[in-house]
Structure formats: structure tokens, C-alpha cells
């Protein structure tokens, strides 16, 4: 590790902290229905969309109606995206003449982009036409991100309201998020990316002649616009197969910094939105502090593991850390930082090969996802994920002092705890059961590039990434097979919607409750003690659930590496 590396990491953290409050202020005004600078531009369009949907900004929904609207909208998006893939060969804006996508792969991709996962069992430049990239994948990048933020806002209303029967309106929340937050920021980011050298064109691929006289086809397309939303919306799906390691997606150090910042920006800002909506910004800062401690710990371990490298390589007289699979333009520090950011935020974009990380370095992205991606997390998804852990944490605190647990004046009772645990436990259900089957199923084992604990980690990472709605991968697993396409697709749907429904149920339950005034026995939830308790609950639940699997994979691989064995 170097001082320069840590300075770069701390600069990133400082930028996020500085952006949290102003972005939170703006987003709070948007979802509160207040006038903003963009209201004259998007106001008429917003009202027109409400008329099309048959609703209005004054109409609110019970949590069950909110959930039904959300599920129907996402089902429609899934069917449209699946259909576009199957009909690709007959549709326009297909200069490379790409044919229909295989049914199993089309199912996987539709599930992936609808759930904000963006797992890719395909190479974008060799499988998807311009039309499919724009009308299918990029559109889902917007609406899946808006869906996640809408759920977070609905859950926040549950804590903020008292004796209410509604938690907002899904159509209004999603429309406002898309028009006032995602779209304007992405327009600005797209222009910046084009200025930095990322392509944005509908022209055909370009044929070039190399210095050796060989012919090379250079893939182009509307890249900048997709990069903007894939990072801001924590989607992660790359226009190109190499993702953010491709120079057309991530040209230089400036674009790399911008992309890392945009991955965290909205997720961090939601903590401030929470504080504003519940009337106490210290509550939001306490949640962000919990996220920050877990994030810094992960960066420190990952950076240290990659900087130390493999002792077997050092024995050959080669020093300088583990550069295998790293982004050589940015070095070990920023490659490790990007890996931790993208898995802490359920983004899935990568600028290095996680399969080439050391055992402990690769374990940190795994842990980030297995904790439910509560460290900032996907836009909205990470925030309502950590609120599930907050419910459990205050319940534990209540047990310790022998009184009914409260959070923000709302009594946390059996229903809320049950729903929170259901949301938390559905993730390991998908991650561990599918992994257990895949590592003994002969047809699934043949897709593993490595044997031993590293091969196990490849499979575990795939299903962890799917259920956590992340989308990054250990590149050694060949996932484009019927088994992996179907099971990973199912895992993505489980990880998204089996969390959303309990979260909305909690929102409805809390919104209907009266607010209880704080008393001398009320546990303060805006200070260091609560931050420590919340971190402890997250780590303990994650450890008890996943330590056996981690021991079989990266931990035993690290111990074997120390004793001279690699896989």
C-alpha cells in the first residue's frame, strides 16, 4: 500500500460526503412535490404522464396497491425486454445484423435488467443491437433504478408518517425520480463522457487495418448515454463485454473518478433524504456513518491483500503486489477501490478482473454482496436493505433493556421484525441453495474454469451477485448455459422482489402507527452507540449465515496459498 493510493481513496470518500447533503436536499424537494429549478421544464410532461397512467400527484396508495402497481410495471418491462431480444433480427438499428437472442439467455437478461442487476452472460458488442441497447437495456436501467428509489421513499414515509393509510403513489414516485433526478443528471454526464472520448453514435462498426496489415472491427454505438445511467443507477451492465475496463467505456482517470462517484452519489444522498423526511438529519448521518465504517474496512482489506500479493510470486523475485487482472492505467489502489465500490453499491460494473484478485481481495466483494449490499447499496435498494437491519438492531436493543423497541417514535413489534427477517433471509436462500446444487451438478461443474476452493468461489460469487442484484462476476465461470441462465435469472428475481414486498409491508404497518414521544428509556438512534450496534448486527447476521461458505472458498484458498498451493 502507498500513501498516494490512500490519498486517492480518501479524496473519493470526501467527494461523496460533500455531495450527500446538496443531493439529499434536492431529492427531498422532488419527492415532497416542491417546486425545483426543473419544474418549468418537466412539470407539463409530468402531469401528462399522470393523465396517461390514470392517476394524479394527489392520489395516494395503500402499501398493497403500491406493491401491485410496482409488480405489474416490472412484469410489463420484463415481457417487453424479452420480446425485443427474441425479435432482434427483424428490428431496425442493427448494423451488425445480429440475430435473435437464445430463449434462456433472453430470460436471464430480461430478469437481469428488470431487477437492476445487469448480470451479463453475453458480450454486448457481439450480441445486442443498437436498438436493443437503447430501447431495451438503457430504458430498464432508468426504470429499474427509479423503482428502487421509489421503494426507499415509500419506506421512509412509513417511518415519517403517523396514523396514515397510504405510503405514496408508485407512479408518481417513479415518474418524479426519472424526470427530475435520473434524466437530467444523465444528460449532463453523457455530455461530459462524450467530451472525455466515450462514443455516442448510431453509425456502423468501423473496420481498421492494424500495423501488421490485419483487419480489425472496432465496435461503436450509443455508449456514453448507457454508461451514464449504468453508473448513476447502479446498474452496471456494460455496453462492451470488457465493461469499465474497455477504453471506450472508461477512457482515463477523470472518467474513472466520475464513474466511481456517480455509483455512490444517489445511494449516499438517500440517507440525507431520510433524515430530512423524519425531521432529524442526524438520523441520516448515523446511517451513512455505519455504511462508511463497513466500506472503509472493506477497502482496507482488499487494498492490503492486493498490495501484498502472492508469496509464491514474490519467491520468484517479482515484487509490486498482485497486478494480475488489474486495470494497469489506474493501478492496484483504484482497481481495489472500484471493486469494493461496485459491490458495495450493487452496481456490477468492473474495471478489473475479480477472478484474478487474491483470495482475501476477492472475498471482500463477496462479503459486500452477502451483507445485502447495505453499504450504500443500489439506488434505493441499499437503503431499504439497511432499514431492514435497523429494525432488527432496535429489536435487539429492546431485548437487552427489557422494553418494547422503538425507532423514530414507532414501536417495532412482531410483524415488522418478521417481515425484516424474511427480507434478510431470502438472499442466502437463493445464494446458498443454488450454489450447493451447482457444485455437485456435472453439467454446472463443467462451466468452472478452476477446481478446488477457487472454483467453488466462482460459483458462489455468481449466485451471490445474482441474488444481491449486483451483476459483477468472477470471470472464470462460463455462465451462458441453460442451467446458469435459468437459475441465475430466478435468483435475481428472488433477490429483488422477495425483499421489496416485505419492505413495503413494513412501510404500510409503520405508517399506520401513532408516534410515541421519546422518554428517558428511549434508545438514541443518532449517535455512535447505535452506529456500533447496527454494524454489529449486520456483521453477526452475515457471519453466521455465510462464514461456512466463505471458509470452504476464499478462506481455505488463502491458507493454501500461504503453504504454497494455488488453484
Image (tube, helix red, strand yellow):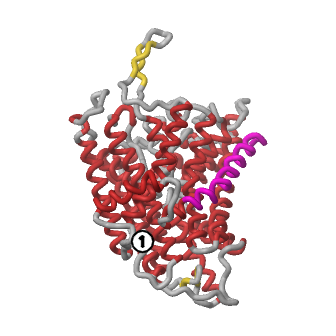
Q: Which residues are magenta?
A: 1-26
Question: Relative to residue 473, is residue 37 depicted above or below?
Answer: below
Q: Nearer the viewer, residue 362 or 406?
A: 406
Location of residue 263 in the rendering, given as x and y in whole percent from the top left corner: 55, 49
Question: Relative to residue 329, is residue 365 depicted above or below?
Answer: below
**Residue 298 located left or right of residue 203:** right
Location of residue 544 in the rendering, given as x and y in whole percent from the top left corner: 56, 68
Question: Relative to residue 88, is residue 339 depicted above or below?
Answer: below
Badge 1: how crowded within 10 Å, few (<14), some, or many (20+)? many
Instruction: Name the residue: 59% across, 79% down.
Output: 408
Is residue 21 found inside the magenta-colored segment of the image? yes
Instruction: Name the residue: 66% across, 42% down.
Output: 306
In the displayed image of the protein, which residue is found farthest to the front?
Answer: 40
Can the viewer see residue 76 in this picture? yes
Q: Nearer the viewer, residue 563 or 410?
A: 410
Image quadrant in which the C terminus is located? top right
Can the viewer see residue 463 in this picture? no
Which residue position is annotated with label 1? 168
Location of residue 341 in the rendering, given as x and y in whole percent from the top left corner: 59, 50
Q: Nearer the viewer, residue 398 or 72?
A: 72
Instruction: Name the residue: 55% across, 83% down.
Output: 410
Q: Magenta: predominant secondary structure element?
A: helix
Image quadrant in which the N terminus is located? top right
Location of residue 213 in the rendering, given as x and y in whole percent from the top left corner: 45, 9
SS label for mark 1: loop
Amino acid at each position: 500500500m502507498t500513501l498516494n493510493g490512500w490519498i486517492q481513496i480518501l479524496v473519493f470518500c470526501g467527494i461523496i460526503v460533500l455531495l450527500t447533503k446538496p443531493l439529499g436536499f434536492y431529492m427531498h424537494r422532488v419527492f415532497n412535490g416542491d417546486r425545483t429549478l426543473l419544474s418549468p421544464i418537466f412539470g407539463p410532461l409530468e402531469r401528462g404522464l399522470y393523465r396517461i397512467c390514470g392517476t394524479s400527484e394527489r392520489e395516494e396508495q395503500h402499501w398493497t396497491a403500491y406493491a401491485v402497481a410496482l409488480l405489474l410495471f416490472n412484469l410489463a418491462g420484463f415481457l417487453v425486454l424479452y420480446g425485443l431480444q427474441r425479435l432482434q433480427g427483424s428490428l431496425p438499428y442493427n448494423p451488425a445484423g445480429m440475430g435473435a437472442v437464445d430463449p434462456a439467455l433472453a430470460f436471464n437478461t430480461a430478469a437481469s435488467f428488470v431487477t437492476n442487476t445487469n448480470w451479463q452472460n453475453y458480450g454486448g458488442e457481439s450480441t445486442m443491437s443498437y436498438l436493443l441497447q437503447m430501447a431495451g437495456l438503457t430504458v430498464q436501467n432508468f426504470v429499474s433504478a427509479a423503482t428502487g428509489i421509489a421503494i426507499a421513499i415509500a419506506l421512509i414515509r412509513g417511518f415519517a408518517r403517523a396514523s396514515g393509510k397510504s405510503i405514496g403513489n408508485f407512479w408518481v414516485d417513479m415518474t418524479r425520480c426519472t424526470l427530475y433526478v435520473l434524466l437530467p443528471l444523465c444528460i449532463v454526464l453523457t455530455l461530459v463522457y462524450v467530451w472525455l472520448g466515450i462514443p455516442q453514435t448510431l453509425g456502423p462498426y468501423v473496420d481498421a487495418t492494424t500495423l501488421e496489415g490485419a483487419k480489425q472491427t472496432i465496435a461503436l454505438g450509443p455508449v456514453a448515454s448507457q454508461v451514464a445511467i449504468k453508473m448513476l443507477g447502479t446498474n452496471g451492465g456494460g455496453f462492451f463485454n470488457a465493461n469499465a475496463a474497455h477504453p471506450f467505456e472508461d477512457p482515463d482517470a477523470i472518467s474513472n473518478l466520475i464513474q466511481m462517484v456517480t455509483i455512490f452519489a444517489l445511494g449516499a444522498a438517500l440517507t440525507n433524504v431520510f433524515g430530512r423526511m423524519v425531521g432529524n438529519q442526524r438520523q441520516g448521518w448515523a446511517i451513512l456513518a455505519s455504511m462508511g465504517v463497513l466500506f472503509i474496512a472493506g477497502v482496507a482489506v482488499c487494498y492490503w491483500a492486493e498490495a501484498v500479493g502472492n508469496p509464491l510470486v514474490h519467491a520468484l523475485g517479482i515484487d509490486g503486489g498482485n497486478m494480475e487482472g488489474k486495470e494497469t492505467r489506474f493501478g492496484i489502489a483504484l482497481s481495489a477501490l472500484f471493486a469494493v465500490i461496485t459491490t458495495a453499491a450493487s452496481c456490477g460494473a468492473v474495471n478489473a478482473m475479480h477472478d484474478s484478485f487474491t483470495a482475501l481481495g476477492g472475498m471482500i466483494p463477496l462479503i459486500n454482496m452477502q451483507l445485502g449490499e447495505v453499504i450504500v447499496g443500489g439506488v434505493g435498494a441499499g437503503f431499504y436493505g439497511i432499514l431492514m437491519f435497523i429494525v432488527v438492531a432496535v429489536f435487539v436493543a429492546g431485548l437487552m433493556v427489557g422494553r418494547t423497541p422503538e425507532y423514530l417514535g414507532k414501536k417495532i413489534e412482531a410483524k415488522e421484525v418478521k417481515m425484516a427477517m424474511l427480507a434478510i433471509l431470502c438472499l442466502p436462500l437463493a445464494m446458498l441453495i443454488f450454489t450447493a446444487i451447482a457444485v455437485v451438478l456435472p453439467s454446472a461443474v463443467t462451466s468452472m474454469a478452476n477446481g478446488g476452493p477457487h472454483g467453488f468461489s466462482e460459483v458462489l460469487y455468481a449466485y451471490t451477485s445474482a441474488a444481491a442484484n449486483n451483476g459483477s462476476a468472477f470471470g472464470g465461470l462460463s455462465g451462458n448455459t441453460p442451467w446458469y441462465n435459468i437459475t441465475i435469472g430466478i435468483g435475481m428475481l428472488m433477490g429483488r422482489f422477495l425483499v421489496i414486498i416485505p419492505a413495503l409491508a413494513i412501510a404500510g404497518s409503520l405508517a399506520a402507527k401513532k408516534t410515541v414521544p421519546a422518554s428517558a428509556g428511549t434508545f438514541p438512534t443518532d449517535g455512535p452507540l447505535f452506529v456500533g450496534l447496527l454494524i454489529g448486527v449486520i456483521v453477526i447476521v452475515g457471519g453466521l449465515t455465510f462464514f461456512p461458505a466463505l471458509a470452504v472458498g476464499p478462506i481455505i484458498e488463502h491458507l493454501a496459498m500461504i503453504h504454497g498451493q494455488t488453484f
